[in-house]
Image (cartoon, rainbow, N blue to C red):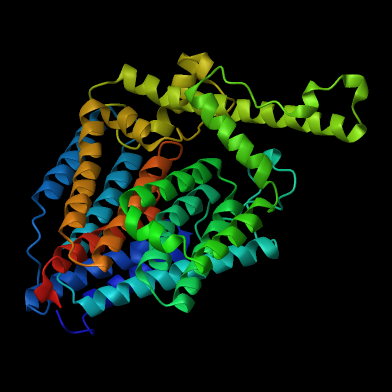
Amino acid sequence: MNNNRSLTYILVLLHLFLVPLVYFKKGIISIEVILIPLLVLAFLWEYRKGTIKLNSLPILPFLITFGLYVIISAISLVNAVALTPGIMEIARFLSYVVVFLIAIKVQFTKEQYINFAKAFGAAAIIVGLFGIIQYIFNISLNKAGLYALQEAKGRVDSTLINPNYYSSFLNFVIPSFLLLAVVYFKDKKVQLMFFAFYAVFIVNLILTYTRAAWVTMACAFVLIILIMPKRFLKNFVKPHILIAFVILLTGVYFMPDVQSRTQSAIYAVQKLVFPNAKAPASDIKDKDPEDLTPEEREEIEKEKQEEAISNTAVVSRVTLWKTGLYMYKDNPVLGVGMGNYYTRYKEFVTKYPELDIGHDAYSVHNSYIKVAAETGTIGILAFLSIYVAYFIYLIRLYFKQNDELGKIVAAGVFVGSITFMVQNLSNNLIFIPQLNIIFWLVGGLAIAFLHLNQNRSYY
């Protein structure tokens, strides 16, 4: 397809630019509800006319895994107390599938793929800049979770509704921007410009004050080095990159609540892995209480409060996970029905009082447990098989790339996608339309580009 006036091409561009930037919901109407039907209609019309072509990438594994999960989800509705939430959730999932299949199968040109990257990159940068402006001018900052923060004004969510959702979006784009800054571009000015964009995202991620996202970001940095050790480390140790990184780390270190929140994040992870773990003791605690100054007593009290908050947060999160697991245990074959976790929540906390954390309905805060609870054993296996296929495609295409750009695209999207999957261990991100349209559209376009990029004649 060589025509930049193609409606399919234009609507993909609009998705990449508008979905991250625009959030509104009036009843069932939202930006994706408007754009996705238009994209489907444009694709069907132009494919029928022959103005767009499909590439040769085989997608049977995706068709099988997507289809299997949709069928199992529909069958699970026999156990549903409420049909409407389940039908709506299946419909949303099908919209992601359609967007992904269009992105992965339509044969765009190299120029068009570059324009896709520019549109999405521009949207991400605007979202990041707005996040900083939001914090500086205290524009609709999210106040949830401020009980654990002493200095911060609030938590940044930019255009993505919720700080947890926003942190996931940031972790999805950060690896690609870092690789472009350090590995791909050779000109110092361009490198520093992209490193500045990377720094904007890091600052935003800190300002979400989402501890799981901070840990995920650190792990993603290590994963990038493991995937591209020679290319990454060779450029990373260059003076201008090292200086920029040191400046960024220094600035981040002195941001509000970073030091205490980092300790809290590490402690929370330790508590999840090792339930009997104790909070790190400070030197002040070793002093004789009579020798303590008022400031030191205040600091000790603050540490005790933060430890109590972390313990409460961990216990609450684990209890929510247990609620989903109890649903799965009681309904292991078909689950409680697609979309029925919230509907059945009160029933289960009443049946098992130890699960009650004082709410009539509450998110399970784990996408995988939610799927298992709602669709049973076969459902969660089918669901996970979709992502297994996705990552196998990315890994295989990474090793087939003949140039640096291809390897960077594959590595960046792979690591970004890993962060998305990891953060779903502590949030229901897979069920957030705005995030999933971005995930599946970018992932599909990346796989299609990598498929074509492995063939030198593509140029």
Q: Is residue 436 visible?
A: no
- Image point (39%, 60%), residue name: 234
Of the pair 233 and 192, the residue shown nearer to us:
233
- Image point (46%, 70%), residue name: 194
Q: Is residue 427 visible?
A: yes
In the rendered view, does 443 fall on the left or right side of 26? left
- Image point (17%, 65%), residue name: 402
In the displayed structure, 264 sits above or below 30; it is above
Number of numbered callouts drawn: 0
Of the pair 11 and 181, the residue shown nearer to us:
181
Of the pair 227 and 235, the residue shown nearer to us:
235
Quadrant, the N terminus:
bottom left
Quadrant, the C terminus:
bottom left
- Image point (74%, 27%), residue name: 304
In the displayed structure, 222 sits above or below 319; it is below
Residue 92 lies, in percent from the top left, at 31, 51
In the rendered view, does 330 fall on the left or right side of 252? left
In the displayed structure, 448 sits above or below 439; it is below
Residue 273 lies, in percent from the top left, at 47, 24
Q: Quadrant of the rendered structure where residue 158 is?
A: bottom right
Residue 269 lies, in percent from the top left, at 52, 31
Residue 443 lies, in percent from the top left, at 27, 58
In the rendered view, does 83 fall on the left or right side of 285? left
Of the pair 30 and 256, the residue shown nearer to us:
256
